[in-house]
Amino acid sequence: MTDPPVEGALVDLDGTVFRGDPLIEGADDAVATLRAAGVSVLFLSNKATRRRAAFAEKLRRLGIDVDDDGIVNSALIAASYLETHHPDDPVFVVGEPPLRDELRAHGLTLTDDPEEAAVVLASMDRQFDYGTLTKALHAVDEETVFLATNPDRTCPTEGGEIPDCAGVVGAIEGVTGTDLDRYLGKPAQTAVDAALSGLDLPASRCLMVGDRLETDVRMANRAGMTSVLVLTGVTDRETLARSSIQPDYVLESIADIGQVLRGE
């Protein structure tokens, strides 16, 4: 058994539970194994391009029972952060409709006028174009708070990796000459706080299971969680061997999660 005993598990989605549309083989059984061991499971994703309700619906379709409250994604983390720290500030969003919907649901004011923006929030945006970049250029200045949902460079899909939020941030930083103020999703403390609040557990009693060293494993290691890397996403053994970020456990797949519970 792990020491101290595990009571909660934060589980990444893309590259860990599914890749693109299909379930990663054995992921449904792995979640069942965790729950049967008395471990509370919360799904924690940096993806802001899908509504939490859509994540929950997809997981149920794949055989994993979960409700909307069992999902925390970077859109929710960003909305909660802005609601606390910038409740009255107009937000210029570079991102997709699900992110905008989450922000509005938290009572935030969005603007498409760069001159009105007090906050610029960047995220993965598959419709990102020159016009959007030009607006962002005019929205970001020395008084604007420049935030982003997540630092992921790429997102794993069935057809291979595609650009994620870091590409959008890089473009905006490049044209404005302004560095991002902060990322809000994994591995940031804002993500840790949101996840642990959802589980109501201390970090030392939790696993973080994910496929990405620089977000999932880094966050877990910093927070004092047990870090579990799975090799079904963006990280392979060669990449792991070169990295300064090392997990507590390495699994071929989340299907092997029983090894962690047994402390193997």
Image (cartoon, grey):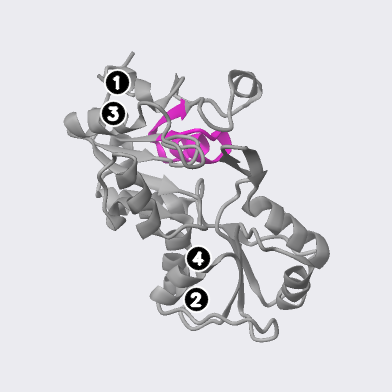
Residue receiving disc 2: 86
Q: Give the residue at x 56% y 53%.
A: 150
Q: In the image, what residue type sits under mark 2?
A: His
Q: Is residue 164 left or right of residue 65?
A: right
Q: Are marks 2 and 4 in contact (CB under 8 Å)?
A: no
The residue under label 3 is 29
Asked which secondary structure carries label 2, the reply is loop
What residue is pinned by disc 4? 99
Q: Position of residue 1 (x, y in %)?
A: 25, 19
Question: Circle 1 is placed at which residue position?
Answer: 258
Residue 181 percent coordinates (x, y)? 63, 62
Q: Can you tell which mark lies on residue 195?
A: none
Q: Amino acid at mark 3?
A: Asp
In this orientation, which residue lies closer to the viewer: 135 or 201? 135
Q: CA distance from mark 1 to mark 3?
A: 10 Å
Q: As displayed, is residue 175 above or below residue 64?
A: below
Crowding at mark 1 (Cα within 10 Å: few <14, some 14-19, many 20+): some
Q: Does 225 lie within the magenta span?
A: yes
Distance from Cα at disc 4 to Cα at disc 1: 35 Å
Q: CA distance from mark 4 to mark 3?
A: 30 Å
Q: Nearer the viewer, mark 2 or mark 1?
A: 1
